[in-house]
Amino acid sequence: MSTSDRVEQPSGADAILTERRDDHILIIRMHRPHRRNAFDGATAHALEAVIDDYEADDQLRCAIITGSDTVFSSGQDLIAAASGDMAGAKRRGGFGIMGQPPRKPIIAAVEGHALAGGLELCLACDLVVSSRTATMGLPEAARSLVAMGGGCFRLPQRIPYHLAMELVLTGNAWPATRFAELGLVNRLTEPGQALAGALELAHDIVRAGPLAVLAGKQIVQHAYEWTDDEAWSNQMEYVNTVLGSEDMHEGLRAFAEKRPAQWKGR
């Protein structure tokens, strides 16, 4: 995977650019400026392929998905949709990620608008860093559409029920500052600094033990499904991948010796 410097109107793989940072971080950039980073089918398949590569690369521990300085994503490309070209991929679903997000952590870095599928893309991520001037919302109802990329059921898991209902039923958009107050946005930055803020958060993640990060993510995701009694036993499927591992012993030694840990991922 490498950064592309193409500037023509992209389609397919050219609409998703990638860049590695410090060996362990992958930056994924949506690049369809002529469609405000809206997704068609080819773009969804391109993102699915990138996510698959991210999952398969043992060196990569965190990914960041971002757009341009003026727009994160405006969602489904409605011009493409009018001709039957929907932004779905066979295995990972909407936008190539919504139905099956990666097991590894992924952060949304938001500038400008994250609307419709753009907000649903944020909801498929584990963390959100946003410019304080960004705007987010689910405008589908205003066009007699339904937010079918996870917005209607993931949003009420992240913010209070009545506020999620207001967004779904009215189609209104709110400033990122409001979403930060509600806990959907982890960190606010000054305009133009969302990617830098996301990189800071990503570096915090890659300094942690990769096995523990994977286990912790899976447990938190399932926490919405389990009762308290179920959680005590069910979590062990993931905890056991960490207990007794080389990384667990290294983490304990590094703490005792007051030095940075050297993770091996095993």
Image (cartoon, rainbow, N blue to C red):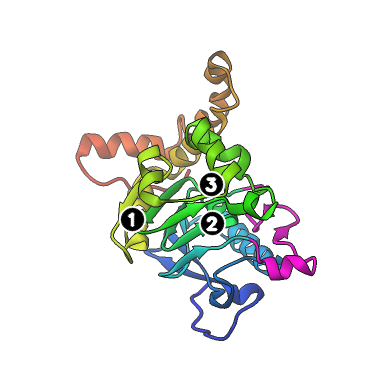
Q: Which residue is mark 1?
A: 132
| Residue 237 visible in the current orientation | yes
Report x, y in % for residue 211: 47, 41
Depth-wise, is mark 3 or mark 1 nearer the camera?
Answer: 1
Q: Are marks 2 and 3 in contact (CB under 8 Å)?
A: no
Q: Residue at x 50, y 29 (%)?
A: 239
Quadrant of the drawing holding the N terminus: bottom right
Q: Give the distance between the C-alpha atoms of the residues marked 1 and 2, in whole angstroms.
A: 15 Å
Q: Which residue is mark 3?
A: 123
Q: Main secondary structure of the magenta part?
A: loop
In the displayed structure, would residue 52 be above or below residue 15?
Answer: above
Q: Residue at x 52, y 31 (%)?
A: 161
Q: Sequence-wise, which precedes: disc 2 or disc 3?
A: 2
Depth-wise, is mark 2 or mark 3 nearer the camera?
Answer: 2
Q: Which residue is mark 2?
A: 115
Q: Give the distance between the C-alpha atoms of the residues marked 2 and 3, in whole angstroms.
A: 11 Å
Report x, y in % for residue 225: 60, 26
Q: Of the residues shown, which amino acid type is indicated by label 3?
A: Leu
Q: Residues within 10 Å of mark 3 (few under 14, many from 20)?
A: many
Q: Sequence-wise, which precedes: disc 3 or disc 1?
A: 3
Q: Of the residues shown, which amino acid type is indicated by label 1?
A: Arg
Callout 1: helix, strand or loop?
loop
Callout 3: helix, strand or loop?
helix
Q: Is 42 situated left or right of 155 in this image?
A: right
Q: Is 251 situated left or right of 59 in this image?
A: left
Q: Residue at x 52, y 29 (%)?
A: 240
The segment highlighted magenta reads 76-100
Q: Give the distance between the C-alpha atoms of the residues marked 3 and 1, in whole angstroms.
A: 18 Å
Give the image quarter of residue 170.
top right
Q: Of the residues shown, which amino acid type is indicated by label 2?
A: Leu
Q: Residue at x 71, y 66 (%)?
A: 41
Could you say which is closer to the camera, residue 216 or residue 133?
133
